[in-house]
Image: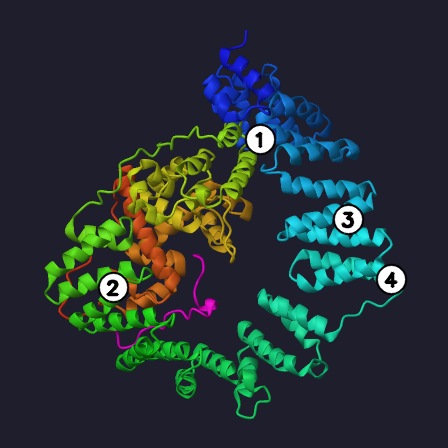
Amino acid sequence: MESKHVVILKELQMICHKIPFLILILICSVSVSRASLIPPVDQSLLLSAERLKKKEYSGARFAALQARQSPTRDFVLGVTAYHLEKWDEAERYLANSEKSLALLGDFALYYRAIALTKLSRHNEALPLLQMLKKDYPEGPFVRSAALLQADIFFQLEDFPNALLAYQTFFGDYSAGNDALKAQLQSALCREKLGDPNGAMRDLRRLWQSYPAKSIAGQAEVQLERLAKLTESPLLFTEEELYKRGCKLFEQRHYKDAAEVFSSLSPGSLPENLRGELAFKTAMIQYRLKKNVEAEQSFARLAAPDSPYRQYRLEASYWLAQLYDRIGKDEEAVTTFLALAGTRPESSLADDALFYAALIKKHQGAHQEALTLFRKIYSEYPASSRAPRALWESAWSLYLSGNFTEAANSFALLANDQTWRERALYWQGRSLEAAGSGNAALPLYDRIQREYPTGFYNLNINRTFGSRNNRVPLLSTSFQVPLSASFGMERAQALIDLGLYEEAGKELAALKRRKGTSFRGSLGHAGLYLAMNDYRSAMGLLHQDALATDIGNSPSAWAILYPAGFHEIVSRHTSDTGLDQCLTFALIRAESNFLPTARSPVGALGLMQLMPATAKGIARGLGIDASNPQLTNPEVNVRIGTRHLKDLIRRFNGNLVSAVAAYNAGATPVLRWRKNFPSLREDEFIENIPYPETREYVKKVLAAMEVYRQLYGLEEVAATVPPPAPIQEKAALPATMELPTNELLSENDPSQPF
């Protein structure tokens, strides 16, 4: 005999298209969501859900086959068959559930339509797609259904309708790889309709406009085929090739752009493009670190007799940047200052002064650097470089022991939100050093109120032995309560069925539909957390929200500081003697708890391990560290914790150095420690030359303390000491390493080893 919940569920499903769902909830006092889709007594469906969470579709199918007959059972069997590519079975079960389980009807319709196309039953699939677009206009499949519909018309050789469908699709969705596919297919429709010239025109446009996309290669293949078919040579004009090269340049495909540009004859281009070609060629040489060629090219463009006078200024600027890169400091400073002196009204003048000042700082010519920094914020107050120049001035004064003047300079930055937190802190530290400790206390109080989870608040708490009262105390097993809010029922139902991939699609559709209101929603973040999708959950809340009323909710803290993969982290930190809090904080900074994370330089997994480093450690552990294994949380955390422990040992237990080395490598950190031997830890961190590493260290150390308070975890031996009392005069290094040039990303490490 069926339970009361199942009977009510069936009644709701029969009429849910006719009466708004919210009214049904009010009438029946029952929500069609979550547990109501899987009755507690049906252990087979519960087992199926557990297997679906792991994408074990064969096991999920076997478990679901043991369940009692119900619309939910049919739906689960249809979806598992779809993923297993059992098209006949998928079509049969989904046909049963698309109406009887209307809450998830569009999933049944779309998956069934795909199954039918795989079975070459295209005419049966078309009405399903039409129904989906009509009945579920805001669902996750409207876009893909429109493209599938066009593809079916093409397969049926109904080229007029296919062309119309592809053009309509591109009109509705102009961005994305599917939109490019629609353009390619439109061209093929034109060919089939007897317009090969129109087809070639569209294909040429694709080839020229999207050269870095795979669609360009497909377009080229079709162009070559059509050229043979029409017995007309496939030729491109010099201007077409130039535009293609420019597209590649804009998309930073410099080698490909260089190949295109080298094939051109400058004399064949209009005069206005010749200078642009020469400058872009020089920039490509610069980006590809062909320093000798770049120096020659920029020098020719910057020369007084250059035929391309409009590029003399930019060429001079980049020539100076090149001098800086290859160690010709004096030539770089001279060129930068000459540019700023002769063209002070230029948009590059403030940048030129800024980099000249940084070079002087690196050389240890601190007074000259200070003069240049002051010139920037006094003569170019609206410049984007002005706040940084003011900061550098204040920091130089602080390190020189001019604490009162430093405090005044830091105070000028306190109203700039980008610099406010650190400016308040160092203004306070400067006042302390100047003997005005009481004047620093209100500044520290502001930091604690406005930036409760920040690095500087960590230092304040350590200095005064205080605790962050904003942080609640949670269990590592704390679960964010799931909201029963209207609009979330479908995602909740899919999550309970174990269909995390489908739930992710539903949440993506919700995000598009709700826009900005989706962000900041604890309810939506909770749905992501229910799927262990920590990264997406964290992405919905901004760190600053914890200083607002949202920070009163324990759920907000659990979302932004999840104890993800706790069992794995706990076991391997115990084995290595590492601090759990440090490991959680590092994983949070590295990957936001995404096991499959991959960096642009190839670092993999939760702890973003470089394959070569991982293999070296894995050999000692006797385990497999192939790339696929590095996205396995168990393997990644085991190797990553051992790597982190080795770094802590190498730096004699100093966490600041170990964390910096995890990001930048040990060699630069050893050099920085040698260059800045007398700086306190907070001063040393602020003086790290690599901006990414500097902020990384702050982020990890601050998060480590939040994790400790949030989950009540114990501190282990390796610690970060509180900032030492400020000496009467801090030691200013004779020479300082040049901070990373923000325009030269290759100088700044982007990932750890």
Q: Which residues are magenta?
A: 731-753
Contact? badges 2 and 3 (CB < 8 Å): no
> Is 695 left or right of 299, judged from the image as shown?
left
Residue 741 covered by magenta stretch: yes
The residue lying furthest to the bottom in this view is 305
Q: Name which residue type carries label 2.
A: Glu
User: Which residue was labeled with disc 3?
Assistant: 163
Crowd class of label 4 (few under 14; some 14 to 19; many from 20; radius 10 Å): few
Question: What residue does disc 2 label?
Answer: 683
Labelled disc at residue 228: 4
Identified at 63% across, 78% down, the residue is 277
Q: Nearer the viewer, residue 304 or 584?
A: 304
Most common SS among magenta residues: loop
Mark 4 or mark 2, earlier in chain: 4
Secondary structure at numbered mark 2 = helix
Q: CA distance from mark 4 to mark 3?
A: 24 Å
